[in-house]
Amino acid sequence: MINRRDFFKMAGAAVAASTVSKVAMAALPEIVSSNSPDTQSPMHPASGRPYNPIVTLNGWSLPWRMKNGVKEFHLVAEPVKREIAPGMVANLWGYNGQSPGPTIEVVEGDRVRIYVTNRLPEKTAVHWHGLPVPNGMDGVSGLTQPAIMPGKTFVYEFEAKRAGSFMYHPHADEMTQMAMGMMGLWITHPKNPKFMAVDRDYAFLLASYDVDPGSYTPKVNTMLDFNLWTFNSRVFPGISSLVAAKGERVRIRVGNLTMTNHPIHMHGHEFEVVGTDGGWVPKTARWPEVTADIGVGQMRALDFVANNPGDWSLHCHKSHHTMNVMSHQIPNMIGVQQSDLVDKITNLVPDYMAMGETGMAEMSAMAEMMEMPLPENTLPMMTGTGPFGAIDMGGMFTTIKVRDTWPRNDFSDPGNYKHPAGTQAYEFTGEIDEAERRVESTEKPQVELNVIKPTHHQH
């Protein structure tokens, strides 16, 4: 649990200088920056209306200051370095040292003022996705406002009128800037903290990148063929787990700013979609689900009761989205005998390894037996190790860790789940009888047809 003052003590946090003059800077809220890839503790409000804070997966919430009853924030659009997972860093664009930028948390009815300083090499603007704001605050450069030029600071000011889950992102050179990682979460909490209250509230954004092995900067012209599918610009095994105690009510808010839809699937529990970026879903319109398809530009709030202890998978159900850096041009080699070719190929390519003959999982097995060299700044396609061996996952995959008891304000990883006796799959070592197979008859069936010839037309 942290407040605004304690935030400055966090690892990776810093107060940065602005591009505006020192006199002007004195009138602005401090610029708070963080480059830590770890999930930070929820930031409880030190001023303003009370609310139940969220936990941003592998992220943090932006501190504010109160000035004459207005909640003031300072966003800085700038180039950042983001650790995608241990072993890979990407050159992205983001806000306040990170991509996605920090989560902005306010309360329904708050008067909000956001200073946006542009430290990018090109113009930008900020659109408040889903928020009902005056037209001149909508953040579409050229249409509702002049663009924010490099080195300039603009001010957005409006009332947070509707509680819910929202996003912010550029509406200037959007293809480039969003492909480079410019996005963030905006949460407007209900004025009544007891309304739609939960015990743990998590949030993250879906983002995709195309970063070739050996390079550091995403391609910005890619349409759909991305090779990194991320939760909050992190891939498995770099994504934090979501933890809960048995019986707690948990909310997971997911926003999609990729170029395709994502069926987010939860193991071990059923949930209800209780909110969208258009508002809360009435109880009479909800139904139990285990997978929610989240379209491009959509936010969904998923509520469930953590009533089933264990380490449960949470992932996109598009199988290529749970893999890391991969080429989509590799042929299917299942069943192809390569042993007679290996010696010939290694004469030309010394580090060549035959793979794919029995499936791609053998990559994990080989990685366990030997040190497989990787190109600079990239990740294995399938990775991660659990208590029983290779997990063979990547991309949009993490775990929900439910324990019989766990401290309310503790969001640290509790370690691997210990299965009670008799509740885990095991190998059968007995004799397996031959299967009885149905014998097909060789006799042709006798078919009798009765044909009735019509005597007149029917209409």
Image: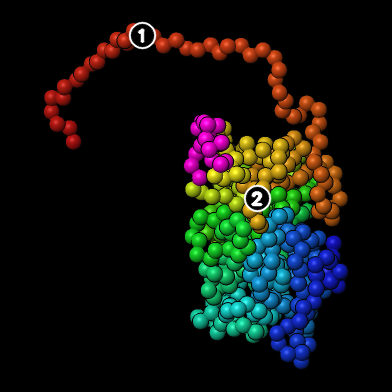
Looking at the picture, which amino acid does disc 2 mark?
Leu
Element type where label 2 sits in the image: loop
Closer to us: mark 1 or mark 2?
2
Q: Is residue 66 magenta?
A: no
Q: Is residue 105 above or below residue 56?
A: below
Name the mark on residue 79. none
Which residue in the structure is indicated by mark 2?
Answer: 374
Q: Nearer the viewer, residue 192 or 29?
A: 29
> Is residue 288 at all visible to an observer of this figure?
no
> Is residue 225 at all visible to an observer of this figure?
yes
**Spot occupied by residue 359 in the image (x, y as percentages of width and height):** 57, 35
Which residue in the structure is indicated by mark 1?
Answer: 442
The residue stretch that appears in magenta: 330-347
- Dividing the image into 4 quarters, which one contains the C terminus? top left
> Could you classify mark 1 by the number of other residues whose Cα lies within 10 Å: few (under 14), some (14-19), or many (20 or more)?
few
Q: Is residue 167 above or below residue 145?
A: above
Q: Residue at x 76, y 72 (%)?
A: 33
